[in-house]
Amino acid sequence: MKNLLLRALLLSLVCAPALATLPGTDDLDAVLLRNVRNGFVDYDGIRADPAFGRYVTGLATATASDLGDPEVRLAFLINAYNALAIQGILDGYSPSSWFGRRTYFKGREYGFLEGTTTLDQLEHGLIVPEGEPRAHFAIVCASLSCPRLASQAYDAATLDAQLEAAARAFANDPTRNRYDVKYGVAFLSSIFDWHEADFVRAAGSIQKYLARYVSDPDVAALLARDGFEIRFVDYDWDQNGVYRGRPD
């Protein structure tokens, strides 16, 4: 119910007169460029960077904007998720344990468009309903098995290319997905298990969806005919970076 209410709020903001613009991506872009290397996050560096605080504050204080354009809306939501997932770590939360995941995803509330949201509400109530499976490779919940956090913010003008790059990077990352052609077994990220319906809706099956992005032609050919036995890999919830600091 809360997810539905949050989505209704967002839709009402889309239709409302613009009272303030959404936070620009310049601050987030600069923070990610300075503090993310190949997906590895320097949380201490982000905490010390005033640009990050400005961006998160902007998420909370924005009142309305032109979110009618799907690319603008989705880029904004992906950036918001990634920034708030980082903020959760800086606040002392962590998804590394079962209890920690409950508080990190569902318990911690963040200021968002003059209301509040949790990471769970933001993902399942707003991002997933956008109907773009590639978003699963762009949102990052501070864990090693998540997609690698990009070193730049998502931008509406380049969103399609950025999502394509994210999908290809994830599909071909041997630390996330492995394809054993000899034995016909694909060891896939649990993301494909949790969100199977999204990939089936887009391509008919998980394997056919992956066939669009895998670089190895032999692997892609086998995926295209659903030729692998799928085994989902346990998720590694350890943190995707170092944080030595503590919340004030």
Image: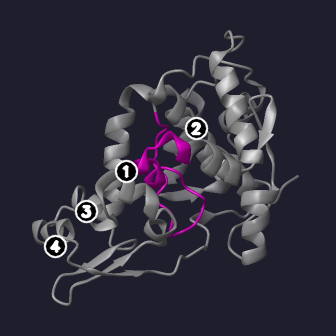
Q: CA distance from mark 2 to mark 1?
A: 16 Å
Q: Is the residue marked by circle 2 packed among few (<14), some (14-19), or many (20+) residues within 10 Å?
A: many
Q: CA distance from mark 2 to mark 4?
A: 34 Å
Please say whether residue 86 is visible from this viewpoint.
no
Q: Nearer the viewer, residue 14 or 34?
A: 14
Q: Amino acid at mark 3?
A: Lys
Q: Is the residue marked by circle 1 packed among few (<14), some (14-19), or many (20+) residues within 10 Å?
A: many
Q: Nearer the viewer, residue 179 or 49?
A: 179
Q: Amino acid at mark 1?
A: Ala
The residue that label 2 is drawn on is 77
- Residue 166, numbered label: 1
Q: CA distance from mark 4 to mark 3?
A: 9 Å
The residue that label 3 is drawn on is 208
Secondary element type, mark 2: helix
Q: Amino acid at mark 4?
A: Leu
Question: Mark 2 vs mark 4: which is more N-terminal?
Answer: 2
Q: CA distance from mark 4 to mark 1?
A: 22 Å
Secondary element type, mark 3: helix
Relative to residue 97, is residue 154 drawn left or right? left
Q: Which residue is located at x 47 percent, y 70 percent?
A: 193
Secondary element type, mark 1: helix
Q: CA distance from mark 1 to mark 3?
A: 17 Å
Please say whether residue 201 is visible from this viewpoint.
yes
Q: Which quarter of the picture shows residue 189?
A: bottom left
